[in-house]
Image (cartoon, helix red, strand yellow):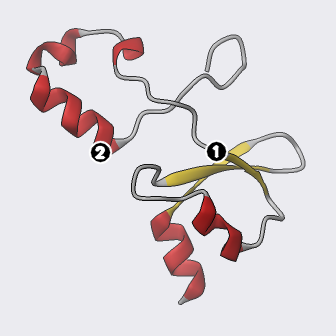
Amino acid sequence: MQNNELIGAISDNGLFQKIFSNPDLKNESIESVIEPLLPIVSFDTPIEKLKFYITKDNGAVLGKDEAGMYHIVTKYDVIQSLG
């Protein structure tokens, strides 16, 4: 976040790939590893529609609740909800 605005994300997969490509990255600022912002969906988005947003390249979405708070929803969360 920057000035209370979402500007990007950091994923374990993206960070994993970048740190092995450049081990000195651990001494850099957060801006050097930031990735594009995750898709934002409303809390009432049906779980079946999340498959269009959560992909192999994008492992999560941000759900925005009625109060304007963001919550991360991962592939694991979706699998758990279907079980």
Residue 39 badge = 1
Residue 25 vs 48, above or below: the answer is above
Q: Secondary structure at mark 1?
A: loop
Residue appearing at x 47%, y 50% in the figure: 58
Residue appearing at x 80%, y 59% in the figure: 43
Residue 14 vs 57, above or below: the answer is above
Residue placed farthest to the front in the image?
52
- Amino acid residing under circle 1: Pro
The disc, 2 or 1, on the residue closer to the chain's N-terminal end is 2
* Quadrant housing residue 4: top right
- Amino acid residing under circle 2: Asn
Residue appearing at x 41%, y 50% in the figure: 57
Please state which of residues 33 and 83 is positioned toward the viewer in this rendering: 33
Residue 13 badge = 2
Residue 11 vs 25, above or below: the answer is below
Q: Secondary structure at mark 2?
A: helix
Residue 11 vs 71, above or below: the answer is above
Where does residue 59 sit, x and y in percent of width and height? 45, 54
Where does residue 33 sit, x and y in percent of width and height? 35, 22
Categorize mark 2 by other alpha carbons within 10 Å: few (<14), some (14-19), many (20+).
few
Residue appearing at x 84%, y 40% in the figure: 68
Query: In which quadrant of the rendered image does the N terminus lie?
Result: top right
Residue 54 badge = none
